[in-house]
Image (cartoon, grey):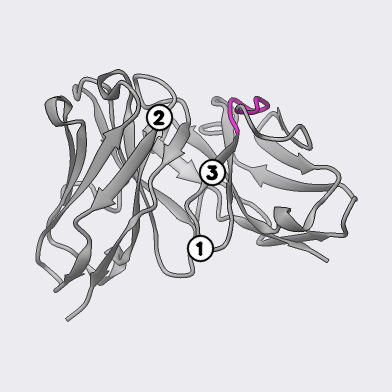
Amino acid sequence: QSVVTQPPSASGTPGRRVTISCSGSSSNIGRNTVNWYQQLPGTAPKLLIYSNNERPSGVPDRFSGSKSGTSASLAISGLQSEDEADYYCETWDDSLNGWVFGGGTKLTVL
Amino acid sequence: QVQLVESGGGVVQPGRSLRLSCAASGFTFRSYGMHWVRQAPGKGLEWVAVISNDGSNTHYADSVKGRFTISRDTSRNTLSLQMNSLRTADTAVYYCAKDGGWSGYDFKDVWGRGTTVTVSS
């Protein structure tokens, strides 16, 4: 049971917008930045969003991140079939003195 | 190009030891923090350990504290994970990941393909 919570699944149709939430507490998201990773089936994770809302070079601007208080969100607009993957949020936890991942959200493109 | 290649995985009995390695190339290894992250079969990601760029600062997940040791050899551009007293719960794919900064407190911007560790009698 992770200290950072994500919905286990999400879905959307091509072209639509979907959001994935990440809920934490004052010891983690409330004090530290959030990163997001995409893991396509059978592959290693890939950095998608860092420092709450920054996109690494090469990540399409269809992907965006935000943070408010002890929660964060990943939004994917113009959903495409290749976006079908597992998505993980991550942050530092001051109480645990370590990194924590959310449990992951499996995104299905209908 | 920037690359991380893990090795050392395998099948090991509970209570035994295993040492994982990660060969880094394409970037200035001594300038960045490094991580180990694992993923049990069918499960999510679990952070394992981090080491700062100069090796002076390390942190571990509670689940491995006292059993695992992260280290780095700057002369060989290699990250290591010494795993002792292995348990069946340690069965996972182990990923090596580069931090975006020197301390290990930023984000993981480069990942290896992983090496599989199976702990079973």
Pointer 3: residues within 10 angstroms few (<14), some, or many (20+)?
some
Pointer 2: residues within 10 angstroms few (<14), some, or many (20+)?
many
Q: Amino acid at mark 1?
A: Gly
**Where does the image place residue A105, in percent across and percent down from the top left?**
65, 56
For mark 3, name the chain. Answer: A
Residue in the foreground of this view, choosing between A75 and B64: A75
Check disc 2 and report the residue beneath it.
B99
Residue in the foreground of this view, choosing between A15 and B57: A15
Q: Amino acid at mark 2?
A: Asp
Check disc 3 and report the residue beneath it.
A46
User: Disc 3 to disc 1, how far (Cα)?
Assistant: 12 Å
Give the mark toward the camera: 1 or 2: 1
User: Disc 3 to disc 2, how far (Cα)?
Assistant: 13 Å
Residue that lies at the very extreme toward the left in this rendered image: B16
**Where does the image place residue A65, in percent across and percent down from the top left?**
71, 33
Give the overall secondary structure of the magenta segment.
loop
